[in-house]
């Protein structure tokens, strides 16, 4: 098995990055420097014409989109039990992963990269303002998920041990701090994310990506 993960520091590619570490996989991590527009280089566009991360290369096959990569890694490393097998638990896992990827994630994109949606400066400022408040509510919803997991006796969002939902939750809260949301305003979520960061697999990915969990400046 020959695996290569193209990731960008702090992006959603942190999710498969942490998964591969947790699985004990042998893989080649390749950093894509978004601030230098490496994702728009001819070499990278030949790999992924959308110019996005993550990309997982498995032998001769190239896989894009974080959800597809999460499921592929789960299949490659079934012993890691990243995704529940019981039908209802599996459906709940997919439900949460999809919400993270198609609701919370795009909301942050409207804050961080409003120029993708309009070239009008005033409209961009309005998008940032509006979506910051939406994102604050979404993080509150995520904190509720953590609270319910704890109330049911689970330490982790997706099952009995660390997995992709936990890595995505860490990413989403970290993005919130970039958007000016104080993580201490979400104490249960913040405590949980700090615990996620201490998981050895997550810690290795954090170290390689040189991430600070809290970018809030007040």
Image (spheres, helix red, strand yellow):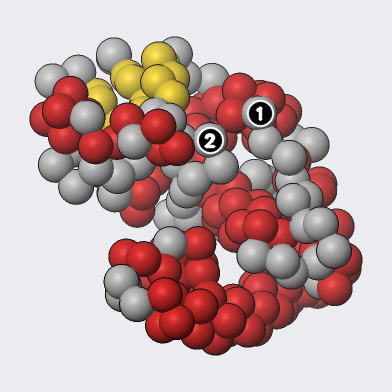
**111 or 15: nearer the eye?**
111
For mark 2, give the secondary structure: loop
In depth, the one of 120 and 2 nearer the eye is: 120
Residue highlighted by disc 2: 9
Residue 16 place in picture, x, y as percent = 45, 38
User: In the figure, is residue 174 to the left or right of 80?
Assistant: right
Q: Position of residue 173 (x, y in %)?
A: 67, 60
Mark 2 closeness class: few <14, some 14–19, many ≥20 residues within 10 Å: some
- Per the rendering, the mark at residue 210 is 1
- Identify which residue is drawn at 54% across, 20% down: 24
Q: Position of residue 81 (x, y in %)?
A: 51, 42
Image-quadrant location for residue 183: bottom right
Query: How many discs mark residues in the rendered view?
Result: 2
Q: Is residue 106 shown left or right of residue 209? A: left
Give the mark nearest the N terminus, 2 or 1.
Answer: 2
Measured as percent of width and height from the top left, residue 162 is found at 65, 45
Q: Residue at x 67, y 36 (%)?
A: 211
The label shown at residue 59 is none
Q: Residue at x 71, y 30 (%)?
A: 203
Q: Say which of 139 and 215 sits in front.
A: 215
């Amino acid at each position: 098995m020959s695996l290569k993960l193209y990731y960008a520091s702090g992006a959603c590619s942190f999710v498969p990055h942490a998964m591969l570490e947790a699985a004990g996989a042998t893989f080649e991590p390749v950093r894509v420097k978004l601030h230098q527009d490496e994702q728009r280089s001819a070499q990278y566009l030949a790999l992924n014409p959308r110019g996005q991360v993550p990309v997982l290369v498995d032998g001769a096959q190239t896989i894009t989109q974080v959800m597809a990569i999460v499921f592929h890694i789960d299949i490659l490393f079934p012993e890691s039990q990243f995704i529940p097998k019981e039908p209802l638990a599996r459906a709940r896992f997919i439900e949460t992963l999809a919400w993270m990827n198609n609701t919370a994630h795009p909301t942050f994109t409207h804050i961080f990269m409003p120029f993708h949606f309009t070239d009008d400066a005033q409209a961009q400022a309005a998008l940032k303002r509006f979506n910051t408040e939406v994102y604050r509510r979404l993080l509150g919803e995520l904190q509720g998920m953590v609270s319910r997991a704890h109330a049911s006796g689970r330490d982790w969002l997706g099952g009995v041990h660390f997995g992709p939902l936990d890595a995505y939750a860490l990413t989403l809260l970290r993005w919130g701090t970039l958007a000016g949301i104080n993580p201490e305003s979400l104490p249960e979520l913040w405590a949980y994310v700090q615990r996620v960061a201490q998981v050895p697999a997550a810690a290795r990915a954090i170290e390689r990506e040189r991430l600070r969990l809290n970018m809030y400046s007040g």
